Amino acid sequence: MEWTSHLLIAPIVLPLVAGALLLMFDERRHTLKAAISLASVLTLLVITVVLLRFVDSETAMTSVYPLGNWPAPFGIVLVLDRLSALMLVLTSVLALAALIFSLARWHKSGPHFHTLFQLLLMGLNGAFLTGDLFNLFVFFEVLLAASYGLVLYGSGQLRVKAGLHYIAINLAASSLFLIGVSLIYGVTGTLNMADLALRIPAVAAEDRMLLEAGATVLGIAFLVKAGMWPLGFWLPTAYTAAAAPVAAIFAILSKVGVYVILRLSLLLFGVDAGATAGFGSSWLLFGGMATIAFGAIGVLASQAMGRLAGFYVLVSSGTLLAAIGMASVSVTSGALYHMVSSTLAISAFFLLIELVERAQDPAANVLAVTMEAYGDDMDEEEAPEEVGLAIPGTLAVLGLCFVGCALLLAGLPPLSGFIAKFALLTAMIGGNENAAMWVLAALLLLSGLSAMIAMTRAGIRTFWAPIEGTVPRVRVSEIVPVGFLLVLCLVLTVQGGSVMRYMDATAQSLHTPMNYVRAVMSTAQVPGPKAAESQ
Amino acid sequence: MAKDTSLILMIFLPFIGSAMAAFFPSNARNAEAWLAGAVTVCGLVLASMCYPAIVAEGPVRAQIEWLPTLGLNFTLRMDGFAWLFAMLVSGIGFLVVLYARYYMSPEDPIPRFYAFFLAFMGAMLGIVLSGNLILLVVFWELTSIFSFLLIGYWYHNANARDGARMALTVTGIGGLCLLAGVLLIGHIVGSYDLDVVLASGDLIRSSDLYLPALILFLLGALTKSAQFPFHFWLPNAMAAPTPVSAYLHSATMVKAGVFLMARFWPVLAGTYEWFWIVGFAGMASLLLGAYFAIFQRDIKGLLAYSTISHLGLITLLLSLGSPLGLIAAIFHMTNHATFKASLFMAAGIIDHETGTRDMQRLGGLFRFMPFTATLAMVASAAMAGVPLLNGFLSKEMFFAEAIETHADSILDRVAPYVAVLASAFAVTYSIRFIHGVFFGKLPDDLPREPHEPPFLMRFPIQLLVLTCLVVGIVPGLTIGPFLHTAVTSVLGLATPEYSLAIWHGVTLPLLMSFLALLGGALLYLLLKNYLAHCEEGPPYFRQLKGQRIFERVMVAVSWRGARFLENRLGTRRLQPQLRLLVAVALIAAAWPLYHMSFGLAAFSWNLDDAVFSGLWAIGIFCAVGAAYQAKFHRLVALIFLGGAGLVTCTTFVWFSAPDLAVTQLLVEIVTTVLILLGLRWLPKRSEEFQTDAIRMAARLRRYRDLAIAVAAGGGMTLVAYAVMTRAAPPTIADYFLEKAYTEGGGRNVVNVILVDFRGFDTFGEITVLGIVALTVFSLFRRFRPAPDSVESPEQQRVQNATDEARPDRTAGETVSDYLLIPAVIMQWLFPVIIVLAAYLFFRGHDLPGGGFAAGVAMAAAFILQYLAAGTRWVEDRLRVLPLNWIGFGLLLAALVGMGSWLFGYPFLTSHSQYVELPLIGSIPVASAILFDLGVFSLVLGATVLMLIAFAHQSVRRLRASRIAAAEEETA
């Protein structure tokens, strides 16, 4: 095997080694630990970008890595295709932003931040790379375990309570995951996803119900992760309670569920799946729509910005699930764009919220909302002297970032949120016309509207309301990550053409899963002593 | 310069200017004005340069590829109509920049103003020049956003905040509708390109989707142009600085709506639906706007309602579907922009010089500012439609159209009367403005002493008023050719003959004009006294405030309603969420089973099963008992749990899986002990505090949960039974059995699977264990026990009390002697267990055991030490470094995995062979054994880390209580 082909596993091994290495040093050596962590994340970013460029250039778009040199359906394989490469890059981008942000102060406020962070990255990357259903479970456990540690990170009553809820729900979902995997294994006798795709069409008619029951239970485990209504009530609370850099990296956690559903529904129940083709897609469509509606309502009803952001995660998940449920290539392509854009936006927003709220007096919030809700004494106010106030520099920067986040969340131009919405809508309207599609289109627009109203309300209260707040003390290293993520959204917009081309290619290959299956199943063992022995 | 470059520059220059303006120091008024002025002049020059080409060759185009696959490109297109608007936007932009230089106070943070202003101008030019429908929506939304920021410029003022928010909400909703409408149009046509769409009128009008597309499109246009019933945001937007109002609310933003309707007039207009919707909105706005304007006290309020009315006029003209109506509409757009911008500026000067805009407080200003007064009078006359001014010409054309019959309906029949009435109102409010402000009694309580403004502040008004006059007197020589270019670019070959002359002879429209002038003047005389003292707002309609209704609706929908729904549709509590999860999983899994008629293989019974079934009956009893007791009797529940675990363990033995049995047994032991240690810190729970009612409700809830649990458990059993009783498919397990020894080098298939075939899973799972240990440790470090579990346990208290009661014993002696003999045995077990662990470890590859089992066993040795001798004693004697052990384990496992890279194999490829050792003989050595060592180290480290998390909690508590005691003594 060539050296470069080992690069495929680096996104898993690198954070693991970094995380383990961090454990060997004393807790008080903050600088050293920060340096190791940062070096790991930077390297990760470089590697993932290299991998992305590799899959995008290569004619054989799927590369496979057989672990332990065992052939495909028997051993575990890692599979790199456009989708997984995209998710890897997205993860490392968020990781970089969250890590730099945390270095200003968060990483010192509890034990083992960096280790947990690195192992979370390992879990995420593993989940995106693996081509084996049980191995996926393992990496889900890795990332969940690390997220348990991180959601509790920083302590405090609220955090511990929300964190324990999070843990309880996700443990229950993990059991469902296991049940689902065992049922599928019991029916098909394999765990390799590509092999499953081959065996599912051949499943006997009387066994299909067991297969479908297993797939449903498995799906529910992922839907819990993605936050689909009515399984996602834990999400806003947990994300709000988490420390800012943790919430920022959590932005991708809900997308893991979406990723798996996208991957598996098209691979296992795609066009070639015979009798089970299209299994569950209408459930995804309607569940997704319910999630958008609930998320949008929650966004409107949110007083604190953190909760608003948490509910927006639901809106974003719902949009993606419903889009997957549409089962059309162009909608999938739009959904992928939406996923990247909304993940970056949510992450930036979670970081920003902490900076903005630093200066705020919680009592002022309550007062402002009461005034707004009863709105009666508005016009009795004397018109004050009409001379504007100079926004202090920090507030101006924060305000600019806030406007960026608001535009992204509400899907307003000129940032990528609009492009995402447009791409989804134009693909949907261009496809089959049916009632569900129109409802979904309306929900997409309305969810953007609710985000706009809620963000305007929050922004006015924070930046414009005359109740005097002190200007927050913000370090450059805290605002730079926010700006970095927002600039990436701008790049997504300006470079929309080439980004969309990548997404189109990704969606196309997802909808023709046979290439993936062929690539995995034809992976050759590296000839060596074992092969020699057995001959 | 190439035409396409100049188009692109026209759009980008304002945005570049905006970015630059943001970085100027906050007092750089002159520099900012120069910058903004330069940008606007550039816009003017660039647009003018394109004019000859437009006349000669038709539209000028430029295109940058953006998202070609989605049909969205950065396409710019300037035809005559767009050119007219581009000139208007840049020209009035220039004048407003000049005006703002003098209007804005030196204390105002001016960079923000100019940055937003220029960006708005760029967006407005974008709307005008867009050659792609989606691009147009992009700029459309941008104008909403920047208008929000501009209206809220003085955000410390509550009215500005509310006005800005309302404007954004209304126009934002409109923008979304427009997007939807444009998507539909694009879907019908198959392209978002403006040229293609403009050429597909018949296709669009005959489509099934025409009506929804039209409604959505019009919602966008009408909200933007503040047309009834969406007009209410405009008066509230008057909280903006006056230059903003002069620009946005006269010449540009509100014009975007009518611009759009005119732009798409060739494809959308001419149908019955168009006529009704647009016509009704236009007529209502025309009449109501004019009527409301009369009764405003605020000058800017008057002008705002007047704008609504004039835009209503334009809308009405567009609704008619006649080419002449379109011509009149376009002509009135330009005329209105000139006179309304100058009037807003005049209002700003009055406000600036006197400190108030309240017409009841103002009066007699002619004496102090005759020049400004004259200009305002001319502009007002244009607004009222007095002959020799531009407003008159377009109003004449309007009257001429109003008396024509277009679509025979009630709307058509009342049009002439409405037109005259609204014009009369316009005359009335124009007179009111002039008379109320410049004539009459001089007030004595003005905040400031009024005087003429600086020349340059007045200059923009002068220029605009001059335009009104010149266009009004010689229209054919001035605006004529440009208007013609604009009109032909919209209408194309369908452009009818029309004449811009002032005098068409004594015609009906002329008569209507005079009627309106006369009627308006009379009405003012009648209302004069009332207006001098009335409240704000028109009689009867005063209570009906669009703003208040809007606020109420917003609060109801977006706040109360949303909160209500959120609470109804969601929950923040854990139990309902878990219940939902189980119920959803149950229903979802039962669905396919029910659907495809689930059946089971026949159940058979033989004697062997009896023992096994008995075993499982015990297991089930234990499991149910654990659940039953979990709430109030945790210890009992834990014991039951242990029983269930043992049954599982025995099951593994029964089915000849000794590996699993060994591992399960060890894990059971260690986890039970760890949980036991943790129980001590949980607060007591007692049933006694509950009232009967609560108990009843709780019982019902638990019965329901029991039913769900029974259903889920039963379902699981049935499914498991079904899977186990069917013929097994060919599985990958066959391969493992076959290759474990030949290629994996081990006879213990389970171990070979764990460390070789699926070593990567193990690799992941040990990481999980390590992370969990870290999490438990971190959580406990900040753990503060509940107040009622801080005290020593009851047994220790009794033992200490005994010590104190007896003189021959010192306190703490009984506690330390407690379980003395077992403690000694436990200490001596340490080396024994180490040997056991080593044994388990080394035989792992061929026989039951392995790194995991060995690690757990080794951890048990540590647990015994801690239990027997206490934390202090152990840690004084042993270097317990669980963190390092975890780290080492992970690193070793990773290094073993990476080692195979050196030989050109994938990660974790194992290698095995037999090694001859002296004395011992031939033993199997696989690289997997090093991996297993990593597993061992990690499992040991993780378990011990959790152990010391508990152990140190006790130490901390002791320390805390000792400090407290010491403090009490000193006190």
Image: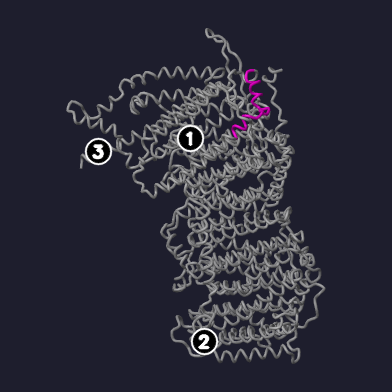
Q: Are marks 3 and 1 on the same chain?
A: yes
Magenta residue check for A502: no
Q: Which amino acid does label 1 sit on?
A: Val
Q: Compared to B650, does B172 lie above or below?
A: below
Q: Which amino acid does label 2 sit on?
A: Leu
Q: Residues within 10 Å of mark 2 (few under 14, many from 20)?
A: many
Q: Which residue, given by chain and number where applicable, does mark 3 sit on?
A: B965
The secondary structure making up most of the magenta span is helix
Q: Which residue lies furthest to the left in this view?
A: B807
Q: Are marks 1 and 2 on the same chain?
A: yes
Q: What residue type is labelled 3?
A: Ala
State the image quarter where residue B724 is shown: top right
- Residue B878 in view (yes/no): yes
State the image quarter where residue B222 is shown: bottom right
Question: Is residue B362 found left or right of A407 in the rendered image?
Answer: left
Looking at the rendering, the stretch of residues picked out in magenta corresponds to B719-741
Q: Which residue lies furthest to the top in this view?
A: B919
Q: Which residue, given by chain and number where applicable, does mark 2 sit on?
A: B531
Q: Compared to A144, does B168 lie above or below?
A: below
- Residue A256 in view (yes/no): no
Question: Is residue A298 found left or right of B745 in the rendered image?
Answer: left
Are the residues tagged 3 and 1 within 8 Å (C-beta)? no
Does label 3 or label 1 sit earlier along the sequence?
A: 1
Distance from label 3 to label 1 (Cα)? Answer: 36 Å
Q: Position of residue B464 (x, y in %)?
A: 64, 79
- Say which chain tag 1 marks: B
Q: Position of residue B320 (x, y in %)?
A: 73, 77
- The image's mark for residue B772 is 1
